[in-house]
Amino acid sequence: MTERPRLLPVLGPAGHAGRDAMTCLYRCGNACEHPIPNRSGNPSLTDVVTTGVSRRGVMLAGAAAAGGALVLSNIAAEPAAAAAVDPREMMPLEPGTPAGALSFKPIPPNKLDSLVVPNGYDSAVVIRWGDPVVPGAPGLDVTKQTAARQSKQFGYNNDFVGVLPINQRRALLVVNHEYTNEELIFPGFTSLDAMTVEQIEVAMAAHGLSVVEIERVGDTGQWRPATKGALPYNKRITALATRFELTGPAAGHDLLRTAADPRGRTVIGTLNNCSGGVTPWGTVLSGEENFNQYFVGGDGAPEALKPSLARYGIPTTARYPSGSRKWERAQERFDLAKHPNEAHRFGWVVEVDPFEPLAKPRKHTALGRLKHEGANVIVAKSGHVVAYMGDDERFDYLYKFVSDKKYRPKDRRHNLTLLESGTLYVAKVTGDSPAAEIDGTGKLPTDGAFDGTGQWIKLVSGDRSFVPGMTAAEVLIRTRLAGDAVGATKMDRPEDVQPSLKTGKIYAAMTNNTNRAVGTNPGVDEANPRSANKHGHIFEITEDQGDHTGTTFTWALPIVCGDPADPSTYFAGFDKSKVSPISCPDNVAFDSAGNLWISTDGNALGSNDGLFATPIEGSDKGHLRQFLTVPTGAETCGPFVTGDDRSVFAAVQHPGEITGASQQNPASTWPDGDFAKPAVVVSWRLDGGPVGS
């Protein structure tokens, strides 16, 4: 049903950029209160050279998370065959009109406690926290929640969303659950220290991933959980109990061995899963991000490990650092004074096969260990698979992985091995303008663009290290230190990195970096041109000669975010009086026409986060428009546009995440009018046409 918007309560104190302090505590363990992990001496580049709100859209409904355009196709209903098809080769469900020039009327910035979409569109919740996932699971009852119940229900704080087709009318929805807000989950919550072990285990069960079979509603772009049939694919993957297999050159290394796993090959759980991607062979990649906040006892870890622990944001001078989650009270392995190698078992790219419910998910060491926002792949001209990744930290790096083996269409067994061996690179970029022209204000240099060249520096290939003093396994386990050693370029929080299947260009969201050029921190450069960068920008990579396996590229900043009226912003040269304001880009995705969709996290312009779309080619390039906004305190996570362009999914993460809010006294009542619940939503055009155009 449709309701009028609710006014927002007064916001709590701001944390990093536009974030609330509660977000800073639970999202990243108050990272800004701790020293910047990257203390390397790597040089910066300067050293190297309105209106139209849909009343139908202001609903008790929601949004969902990251990926690229995946076509829902007219293929057979046999799941493995469906998953083996390269999404770029799949035909649309219906011929219809593909997405083209964007034409929706942008919605204005707002602070409504509702999901808002443009005129001519509607939206609905697909699934929310606590909804049953495993057949027979109970519904949510916050007064009776247990770890056993939560392990069968949809998890908390959905981030990445992938949609993989089964047949013409059904698909698998795969969702990450990044972290939990205990104040908003447990009635009567007082502090993390006062939590019971059962409550800690509930939180652990609310982390991980959900796989849910969904079905189309009638002939519309709406989707809902499937209700008929055995639902054999539905499952939960949790931080509490799910076993993961380690693959690749570092598997079994001494640094990955623990008392519980002396072989160093089996890990329990996955932590802080942020964004991800859908592979051409029908699996999902999930990035383990801010895993550092789950560990205590860094002060008691062996001295030899402390430098690398600190490089990953784990304090080594205090037993209980600010923001720690207290999980060691439920499982001792999170105490590094007793189990120092346990931290090395997180920070990987996880591959989940949703079409094989009994298959053990895998952590691929060949892709390196960092604070992975996610990983997205493209098949190079040579047939090798190339994965692009960002390390979400102030002053950290961009990476890519090139597989040893080649992709084989319809050979799924072979393709499932592609990420187990290959070559890992880190990016070093150079600007083409005089250093004096990059003054920190965001003013364009005289050549009219922030751009330059770059190279991919080889870190490791198979069992061979290219970093002096480090073995291949050490490079993969301590990838940040390897990037430091080869002089990689310090970026402004590289988050989601997505290849365009239409142009082959690569787009990375640089969310923000309020520490840039502040105090003794690294100064501005052409790739990160603003001091105290609170709004972020989009970084575009064009691989030389279109070769994704190559080692050189050119780059540019097509969008420098913020208020279009601010001279420091840039929208590919488009008339800024016609574009929507945008702050803190987080996830990026594409529709079939190659339009870039951008979701935001931590809007520093004072309005709710949202989802935006812009062409990246042609005369309309840079004409950015706001497509939706999420409710009070929420973040918009990685959009996913289905390949028939009739549905756009988004994740509404942490609604009501406002300091002082609680489960009984919520800052948001979205989506059901009682208390805040993270949810995945879908939006569609009322006339059945392609979204956006």
Image (tube, rainbow, N blue to C red):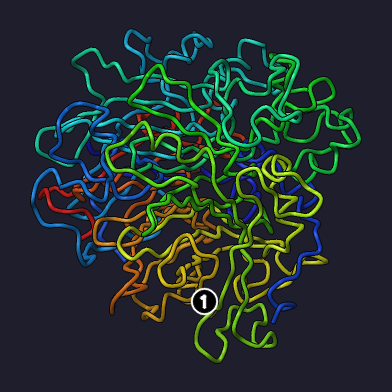
Instruction: Kindly give the residue lying farthest to the bottom in the view shown.
Output: 446
Q: Residue at x 67, y 61 (%)?
A: 514
In the picture shown, does residue 527 fall above or below 8? below
Quick check: 369 left or right of 117?
Answer: right
Q: How many marks?
A: 1
Q: Does residue 659 appear in this view?
A: no
Residue identified by numbered label 1: 566
The answer to whether residue 300 shows anywhere in this view is yes
Q: Where is residue 622 drawn, in percent x and y?
A: 37, 73
Q: Residue at x 73, y 72 (%)?
A: 523
Quadrant housing the N terminus: top left
In screen coordinates, is 99 left or right of 477?
Answer: left
Left or right of residue 86: residue 568: right
Crowd band around label 1 with a 10 angstrom C-alpha radius: few (<14), some (14–19), many (20+): few
Which residue type carries mark 1?
Asp
Residue 437 vertical position relative to residue 327 in the rendered view, above or below: below
Asked which secondary structure carries label 1, the reply is: loop
Q: Position of residue 38 (x, y in %)?
A: 76, 54
Whether residue 535 is situated above or below residue 14 in the rendered picture = below
| Quadrant of the rendered image containing residue 20 | top right
Residue 366 x, y percent position in the rendering: 58, 41
The residue lying toward the viewer, choosing from 617 and 656, is 617
Residue 501 picture location, percent across and down: 33, 58
Which corner quadrant holds the C terminus? Answer: bottom left
Observer-nearest of 454 and 497: 454
- In-front residue for pair 369/606: 369
